[in-house]
Image: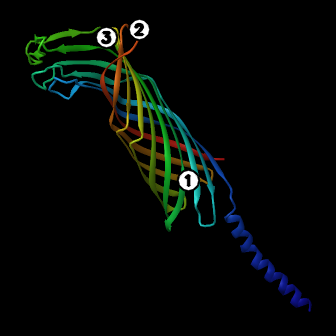
Amino acid sequence: MRNITVFAVLVIIKISIPAAGWAETWKNIPVFSVSPGFGMFYGKSDEIVYAPRGFVSPVHSLLVWDMKPVFYYGLQLDYVQLLNRFKFDFFSSLSLKFGIPGNSGYMEDFDWLSKQNDKLTNYSVHDNTTKELFLLNFSAGLSFPIVYGLHLRALFDFSYKRFCFFGQGGYIKYARVLDAVNGIYAPINDNPRRESIPKDEIVINYTQEWLVVSPGISLRYYIIKNLFTELSFQISPLIMCSDLDEHLKLNDQYRDYTQWGIYLKPGFQFSYSVLNWLEFSLECSWQYISGSKGITYKRNPIGSGLYHLTGNAGTGLSLFDTGLFLKINL
């Protein structure tokens, strides 16, 4: 009788151990992580003024602001929680990136002012300095396995971007005006007006702010338990932009409001866990915005008077982002 009792106890223990392990495996334990990092932006920001009626070229003016490159430091906060025993995970992420001020290439200003043809009439180039760059992203979504090692992640992302630049020095090259009333210009290389600008003289300030709401999808593949790669893609027309342009020589101030268009963001991530609580991650992405259009207002002098409607405007962005992050699981 004693042998039967001992055997029954051993069987119960043998069965209960994996059951307890299974229960522990699927326990809803949230995981928080903090990821400091640094990286580099490389790209440009565009300001567009569309031509009114009577002009041949559809674009009146194009201003291109370089970010080639802008280095940044950042912080990312992540939260993940298992939802059920089929490994549906809820995740959310908050990312902050701060650009380091400094020279970032050139600022170029192109004008097509002729009513006779679509040839370039005015051109200027200046040294561009990025004085402020800030990106905030918040995303949340669900992740679930497709096959062994491969996970599908669906998310919504909210993005805020702010860029501040100023252009200084450089030179201008303006085509000669042949008939101001009828908008006729000589070719820009036919004895144009040229002017050099002192290196330290600031001629233009520009601030651009974006709000983008975007759905996204990604595929994450675990090569081994502690090593994975991920491909992601976002696309959306839900775009809003506000910018402020100050031409200091003319004492003109412009404010543009644009919306809609197309936002694309493909991305790639490679991550390796050294320990359960420590992970290195290399992240690359490209953000592209085109076709965002709206209206522009003008006032003179800068900082005073009332704005008045002056035409149609557009904004654009092309920005590569490469960063290295150190994730610490709490």
Q: Quadrant of residue 109?
A: top left
Where is residue 119 shown, x and y percent of the image?
A: 13, 24
The residue furthest bottom is: 1
Q: CA distance from mark 3 to mark 1?
A: 49 Å
Q: CA distance from mark 1 to mark 2?
A: 58 Å
Name above or below for residue 34 compared with residue 190. Answer: below
Q: Quadrant of residue 175?
A: top left
Residue ID at (41%, 30%): 241
Q: CA distance from mark 3 to mark 2?
A: 31 Å
Tell me the SS state at disc 1. strand
Where is residue 325 shown, x and y percent of the image?
A: 52, 42
Residue ID at (11%, 15%): 182
Mark 1: which amino acid?
A: Ser
Q: Crowdedness of circle 2 by 10 Å Cα count: few (<14), some, many (20+)?
A: few
Q: Quadrant of residue 88?
A: bottom right
Mark 3: which amino acid?
A: Lys
The residue carrying mark 1 is: 273
The residue carrying mark 3 is: 199
Tell me the SS state at disc 2. loop
Q: Are marks 3 and 2 in contact (CB under 8 Å)?
A: no
Q: Crowdedness of circle 3 by 10 Å Cα count: few (<14), some, many (20+)?
A: few
Of 248 and 227, the residue lying toward us: 248
The residue furthest right is: 1
Q: Is residue 111 left or right of residue 279?
A: left
Is any part of residue 285 visible from this angle? yes
Of 68 and 239, the residue lying toward us: 239
Scheme of image coloration:
rainbow
